[in-house]
Image (cartoon, grey):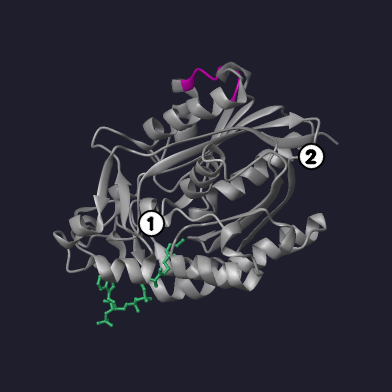
Amino acid sequence: MAHAGIIGIGSYLPEKVLTNQDLEEIVETSDEWIRTRTGMRERHIAAPDQSASDLAFIAAQAALETAGIAADQLDAVVLATVCPDYLFPSTACVLQDKLGAKKAGAFDLSAGCAGFASALSVADAYIKSGMMENILVVGVEVLSRVTNWEDRNTCVLFGDGAGAAVVSAVDEEGLLADFIKADGSGGPFLIQPAGGSANPATHETVDKKMHYVHMSGQDVFKSAVRAMVEGARAVLEQAGFQSEDIDLLVPHQANIRIIEAVRKRLDVPPERAFVNIERQANTSAATIPICLDEAYRSGRLNRGDLVCTTTFGAGFAWAANLLRWII
Ligand SMILES: CC(C)(COP(=O)(O)OP(=O)(O)OC[C@H]1O[C@@H](n2cnc3c(N)ncnc32)[C@H](O)[C@@H]1OP(=O)(O)O)[C@@H](O)C(=O)NCCC(=O)NCCS
């Protein structure tokens, strides 16, 4: 069986930074509340003329450059998002065209904040089956477009950004194990209720602000900790490792208290867990590749390191990956 591994990584964060102080001007909140309850200080917001595919394009170019391959060598573009350019065509197809990935197939994947980890499992399987050699896996979100800026329960939590990885057939073992799971009964706790076929856009759905993120924070919180621990344990067990073998835990960045609870339950010391929530808040499907790119470029992630990602989000859907860093 062929081995699959990440050979290129890149990310992009929009220029505009929205701080907790800025949010104090918009809703009734405080820097102190946001910091202590979530760990967030600031987040990036896309410019009005930037769509998901624009953010993804910049991240993808950086990933291809690190990988040292051209876009026309890609067999597929798998793009995870809940903020597509359009409901259809897929943002993956828009990106495929912008990149000039002439021989690639392309599709979007929707698994909320678990999107990138799920997409990585798809790329892993395509490559290990021998069907493909080079796949661009993207996580991108422009959550600012579906945020209700009058709802303090949600508007402080999210940021925009994109991350991309080139996953290729390689000689050494890169991707070691993947895990995906879902519990659709959790759907109502984190949902954008209108704009799809259940509640198509009408004046009424717009008046009722049903095109925005609706979330029951505490329900999401409780399930997130349990599920992210389950995912990490599952990939470790599949590949025959213990949590003490992890060189870098890369958890989804939704709340510092979730991250800390997951880290402690897995018994991973703080220096082996990657955290950037302070500066980027929750970028949903973009979080994991942004973290990997930052960790790699800052020297926190080195060739040979054992990396465990673990994620949880809307669905509920959760996913994890165990990989050897081979760049
Ligand atoms: C959203 C979240 C930060 C809220 O934290 P919490 O400790 O559960 O806070 P609660 O929801 O119990 O709210 C506590 C109080 O703070 C208030 N509050 C909520 N947002 C606030 C804000 N931005 N500023 C000030 N006060 C706020 C609430 O109105 C509530 O007030 P009340 O007690 O008078 O009703 C937390 O539940 C969370 O992170 N959940 C998971 C979110 C998530 O992961 N989402 C994405 C999925 S990947």
Nearer to me, 174 or 243: 243
Q: Secondary structure at mark 1?
A: helix
User: For the view shown, which residue lies furthest in the right direction?
Assistant: 1
Q: Indicate yes or no whether the magenta region holds residue 101.
A: yes
Residues rendered magenta in the picture = 99-104
Q: Position of residue 241 (x, y in %)?
A: 79, 59
Q: Are marks 1 and 2 in contact (CB under 8 Å)?
A: no
Answer few, some or many: residues within 10 Å of disc 1's Cα (few below 14, many 20 plus, some between 14 and 19).
Answer: some
The residue tagged 2 is: 173
Q: Earlier in the sequence, mark 1 or mark 2?
A: 2
Specify the amino acid type for callout 1: Glu
174 relative to 244, above or below:
above
Q: Is residue 234 left or right of residue 224?
A: right
The residue tagged 1 is: 278
Query: Which residue is at a point 38% across and 64% down the rendered structure image?
Result: 39
Quadrant, the C terminus: top right
